[in-house]
Amino acid sequence: MGRDTRYHGGGTVALLCIPLVPSWLTLSAAAFLPTTSLTRPMQTRWNYHPNESSCHHDGSAVPSRSSAIGGIGPLTLRWATSKGDSAAESPSDPSPPFPIVPTRERTKLQGKLPIISRTVPLGIFLDEGEEISATVWEVEHPSEMMEMWWSAGASDKGKIGDPFGVVMWPGSILAAQEMARHRDVVAGKTVLLLGAGTGLEAQAAACIGANRVIATDISKLVLKLLNYGAERAGLGDIIEGRVFDLFSEEELPDCDVVVAADVLYNELLGMQMGLRCTEILSRPNPPKLIVTDSQRFHGTDFLPFVNAVLEKEGKPQIQWEEHKLEGFTGSGMLVEGDQTYDVTARMLSIGWDT
């Protein structure tokens, strides 16, 4: 097979000469079904505020980015346990749950492709108790797109478009929360997203004060969804959608923070992400790094390779952290409509203490 593109949860990256994996057909549909409610094993849940506010910069619901970060007061991460409704600050727990927001809008991208909004509370609260949320836009019927892509020949897959990056995946929420946990570092900085997908992480970075967000993806369709969501949220002046091939020889753009959410979908992608991680960590002043992986496909753990390189350079070893996401709900890929499933995601979060 010639050049193929492999699509993934957070977004898409290019894949070279990779055949389809028949074993995917044996996976349950839940393996491809993203969602919106996170819980810790102790059954924590968000103290949800009905008056939650989207991260718009038009002065309507939430003040501008500068006033939300500075003029209003510090943002906090809070959760409420199942034993009561009292909220508590959580400086160390990056994965509380997100409730479903029922109101969804429908429109057509460029007047043709039906798309639908998904609003996700970010777990970031203003002092007044208002919770900032991000609204991303997904293809409304991804299962139809998936069926077409699955049955198409190699030469036609690119014409159909990206069936995986057109919906939100669990790793993007975990990455967004981790950035929010380090919002004092992210504020005023440049954030680079690899495989940005529908752009939840991009909006989260902008909401917590990033000066610039470079959101890269190999799929032009996915970037259209991302840019549409950014413009609708009033964040188009901060978020820049850019085509980037993870497998190219092009160096990663200069940045302060790198985020790759749900990009590990086969061995070659895992190895390539490992190479990009060594590129990042070998820089004189390496950017902060977040990598999340909710699907955990066989052969995608690149850490042995990265740690071997770090050992040669006399640098500390790195390791995954695990976070259990329960009742995570989002668009189905193999069936129509929203689906819910539990998943244990792994995450790298490096460099915040330097």
Image (cartoon, helix red, strand yellow):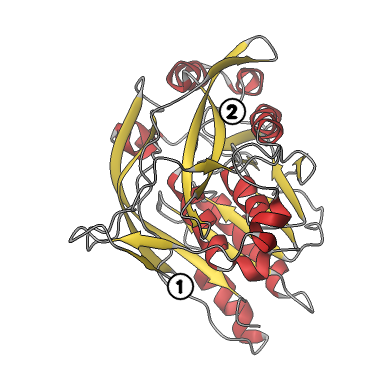
Res 321 visible: yes
Q: Nearer the viewer, mark 2 or mark 1?
A: 1
The one of 192 and 65 positioned closer to us in this rendering: 65
Q: Label 1 sits on what residue type?
A: Pro
Dot 2 and dot 1 residues touching (CB under 8 Å)? no
Say which residue label 1 marks. Answer: 91
The one of 111 and 23 positioned closer to us in this rendering: 111
**Tally of numbered tags:** 2
**Quadrant housing residue 340:** top left
Q: Label 2 sits on what residue type?
A: Asp
Using the image, tell me which numbered label, if any, was put on residue 166.
none
The percent coordinates of residue 183 (x first, y second) are 61, 65
Res 195 visible: no
Q: Quadrant of the C terminus?
A: bottom right
Residue lying at the far top in this picture: please name it.
112
Residue at position x 68%, y 63% in the image: 70
The one of 102 and 268 positioned closer to us in this rendering: 102
User: Is disc 1 surrounded by few (<14), some (14 to 19) or many (20+) residues within 10 Å?
Assistant: few
Please say if 172 is above or below 140: below
Please say if 229 is above or below 55: above
Say which residue label 2 marks. Answer: 162
- SS under mark 1: loop
The percent coordinates of residue 76 (x first, y second) are 50, 64
Distance between the Cα atoms at labels 2 and 1?
36 Å
The one of 274 and 334 positioned closer to us in this rendering: 334
Q: Earlier in the sequence, mark 2 or mark 1?
A: 1
- SS under mark 2: loop
Q: Quadrant of the N terminus?
A: top right
Please say if 49 is above or below 209: above
The percent coordinates of residue 143 (x first, y second) are 43, 20
